[in-house]
Image (spheres, helix red, strand yellow):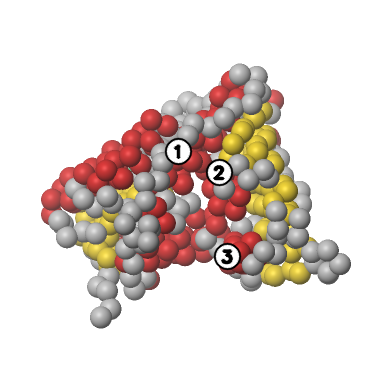
Amino acid sequence: MANSPLKVGVVGMGGIGHTHCNAYIADELAELVCVCDLRKERADEAAEKFGVEKFYTVKEMLNAHPELDIVDVTTSGIENGSWHYVPVMEALAAGKHVLTEKPISNDIEEAREMVRFACQQDLYLGCNLNHYFSEPAFMADKLIADGQIGEQVYALTKVGFNGSTVDVPNIDPTSRWQYPYSHAKAFLTHPFSVMRHFSGDVKYIQAFMDKPGARRQGGDMMLSIQSIHMQFQNGCVGYLLSQRGDAHFGLGGWWSYELAGTKGTFCIENCVEKLTVWQKDKEPVITNTGVTDFGATFPIRIHAFLEDVTNKVDKEHLRASGRDALATMEYIFAAIDSYESGGELVRPHALPAFHGSVNIIK
Ligand SMILES: NC(=O)c1ccc[n+]([C@@H]2O[C@H](COP(=O)([O-])OP(=O)(O)OC[C@H]3O[C@@H](n4cnc5c(N)ncnc54)[C@H](O)[C@@H]3O)[C@@H](O)[C@H]2O)c1
């Protein structure tokens, strides 16, 4: 018998909340039941657009719809993450599975607490780490699984925003971005999630951070340039370069990731667009997917969450889990520690252990 669709309420009706609602409406595994935003006009507009009920607080929504299976949190906040904790904890306390936007939180203690509480409640907590839910990434997964890459040697990531310092806008001191680590905390969760997806946990991190003169002169608090060196537990070395609109990216554009191993190397360009594979004594193999819109990652990632919840996968096998999102924040906080100590080598904080379940241990 087919499963009935999972009932979903979405909290936070900015642009990304709308993107998530569109994905649920188009997905046969989901039924969008309601939307919620503290700003009445945003909740009203979204309810009208999607033809669903609206709420102005999470509590009202949870009380009115005890049958909800999933609460999807697409709020933002300081450094694009400070408004995730409260609605996520409210939904978990009410026994709902949760998908939250990235970064899981801009506060590492809150991030740890959310992952701990989801585990205690025995609920799924996923995060929208959507950058490895793309055709090139799925092809790369297969290359690794088929032994085509071999022992990993290096991983190189360049990702951020194209621009130049002449574009740096007038500074609004009340903006969510006017914090030194706003770019690091809001954005680096993506490249770290991709690097960890392919290479596993990071053992050591070392970082430099900076901002160009125009930002400094304009009084911009944000450190918009990050240069991060790492070693993975599997021995592979990695480098991550990110910048937020201070320069134009050269080769690979705004998003490139290259992984080299003893048997082969692949590079993904522009996230969704292109995969190139190099192997000894062979011509490079280039796949252009024909997809250019990065937005294509959202419905794929959301469908994966719906599949995992529908199939009741072991919590520890949930794709792009809260624990995976916590890992990226531990790396970001390790990079910040390294920068603040003048570039010292830092060992990221340990992740919570896997405890396994009866289904895993066969
Ligand atoms: N995964 C990606 O590729 C990607 C891309 C861009 C943005 N994002 C993330 O998406 C999130 C949302 O971004 P946005 O630009 O749509 O944000 P936004 O600021 O436009 O909208 C957030 C909304 O949440 C509402 N809100 C805050 N706290 C609430 C609460 N407790 N209950 C109900 N409503 C609440 C606000 O009123 C606001 O309308 C951010 O965390 C951002 O980092 C992810």
Question: Residue at coordinates 38% horizontally, 30% vertically from top-left?
Answer: 109
Return the residue at label 1.
Answer: 351
Amino acid type indicated by mark 2: Asp
The residues tagged by marks 3 and 1 sit, at their Cα atoms, a distance apart of 26 Å
Residue 62: image location, x then y, percent: 17, 51
Amino acid type indicated by mark 3: Phe
Task: Provide the secondary structure element on which disc 3 rests.
Answer: helix
Comparing 293 with 233, the one in front is 233
Question: Residue at coordinates 62% horizontally, 42% vertically from top-left?
Answer: 232
Upstream in sequence: badge 2 or badge 3: 3
Task: Provide the secondary structure element on which disc 1 rests.
Answer: loop
The residues tagged by marks 2 and 3 sit, at their Cα atoms, a distance apart of 19 Å
Amino acid type indicated by mark 1: Leu
Task: Provide the secondary structure element on which disc 2 rests.
Answer: loop
* Label 2 CB sits under 8 Å from any ligand 1 atom: no
Return the residue at label 2.
Answer: 201
Question: Residue at coordinates 17% horizontally, 45% vertically from top-left?
Answer: 59
The answer to whether the residue labelled 2 contacts the one labelled 1, judged by CB atoms less than 8 Å apart, is yes
Residue 81: image location, x then y, percent: 41, 38
Question: Which quadrant of the structure image shows residue 23?
Answer: bottom left
Locate the C terminus by quadrant: bottom left
Residue count near mark 2 (Cα–Cα under 10 Å), binned few <14, some 14–19, many ≥20: many
Give the number of the mark in front: 2 or 3.
2
Return the residue at label 3.
Answer: 138
Comparing 50 with 261, the one in front is 261
Residue 243: image location, x then y, percent: 64, 38
**341 left or right, relative to 115:** right
**210 left or right, relative to 61:** right
Question: Which quadrant of the structure image shows residue 203?
Answer: top right
* Label 3 CB sits under 8 Å from any ligand 1 atom: no
**Residue 347 in sight:** yes
Which residue reaches farthest front?
362
